[in-house]
């Protein structure tokens, strides 16, 4: 079935590669857009003290992910978009099942998961260990991984893709 533009979604995807986005040579100087998930709250085992190893504590996660949203916006086709519900569920599952001493380690592992499993070129993870310090709303870390300026070379349709 053709979309509103009169183009069948499979034909459109085939012309751009399996990632659904533009190839790097088609992107020109356009910067990546940012899709975010804010205040994802998950209970996990986190901390260095003995008492922390015996309980589950809340962490609040904010994610920002680089993506080229132009194809999804132009087609109004969810198949062209980053599935942020899947990202959210996967991060919740991973964090809920994990056990780390340091927020730094947990943040690194979340970033690697998002980059590897969802083929985004760039991610920013803000991890807040709520209630870790008396008198503070939270304490945590913000990390950025990947390249924000262009598509990932190893992603389908990226520069290393022979298509």
Image (cartoon, rainbow, N blue to C red):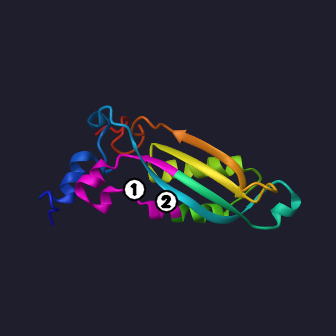
Say whether residue 100 is left or right of residue 117.
right
Which mark is on residue 141?
Answer: none
Residue 93 belongs to magenta span = no
The span from disc 1 to disc 2 (Cα, nearest Å) is: 9 Å
What residue is drawn where x is 62% and y is 45%? 142
Say whether residue 133 is left or right of residue 79.
right
What residue is drawn where x is 29% and y is 32%? 28
Q: x, y (%) of residue 121?
A: 45, 42
Sequence-wise, the earlier of marks 1 and 2 is 1
Q: Do tag 1 and tag 2 residues touch (Cβ < 8 Å)?
A: yes
Q: Is residue 161 above or below residue 72?
A: above
Q: Quadrant of the C terminus?
A: top left
Say whether residue 123 is left or right of residue 154.
right
Question: SS class of the residue under badge 1?
Answer: loop
What residue is drawn where x is 56% and y is 41%? 144
What residue is drawn where x is 29% and y is 54%? 72
Q: x, y (%) of residue 57?
A: 74, 64
Range shown magenta: 64-88
User: Picture quarter containing residue 29?
Assistant: top left
Q: Is residue 153 above or below residue 53?
A: above
Give the labeled residue for mark 1.
82
The residue at the far front in this view is 135
Within 10 Å of disc 2 (Cα), the crowding (few <14, some 14-19, many 20+) is some
Question: SS class of the residue under badge 2?
Answer: helix
Residue 79 belongs to magenta span = yes
Give the labeled residue for mark 2.
87
The residue at the far right in this view is 50
Nearer-the-camera pick, 163 or 46: 46
Q: x, y (%) of residue 76?
A: 26, 59
Say whether residue 156 is left or right of residue 41.
left
Nearer-the-camera pick, 88 or 156: 88
Q: x, y (%) of residue 149?
A: 42, 34
């Amino acid at each position: 079935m053709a979309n509103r533009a009169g183009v069948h979604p499979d034909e459109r995807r085939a012309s751009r590669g399996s990632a659904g986005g533009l190839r790097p040579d088609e992107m020109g100087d356009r910067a990546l857009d940012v899709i975010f998930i804010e205040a994802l709250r998950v209970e996990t085992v986190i901390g260095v003290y003995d008492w922390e190893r015996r309980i589950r504590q809340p962490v609040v996660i904010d994610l920002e992910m680089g993506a080229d949203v132009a194809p999804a916006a132009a087609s109004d086709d969810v198949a062209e978009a980053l599935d942020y519900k899947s990202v959210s569920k996967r991060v919740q599952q991973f964090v809920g099942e994990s056990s780390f001493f340091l927020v730094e380690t947990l943040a690194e592992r979340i970033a690697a998961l998002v980059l590897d499993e969802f083929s985004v070129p760039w991610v920013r993870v803000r991890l807040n260990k709520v209630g870790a310090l008396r008198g503070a709303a939270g304490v945590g870390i913000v990390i950025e991984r990947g390249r924000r300026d262009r598509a990932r070379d190893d992603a389908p349709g990226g520069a290393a893709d022979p298509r």
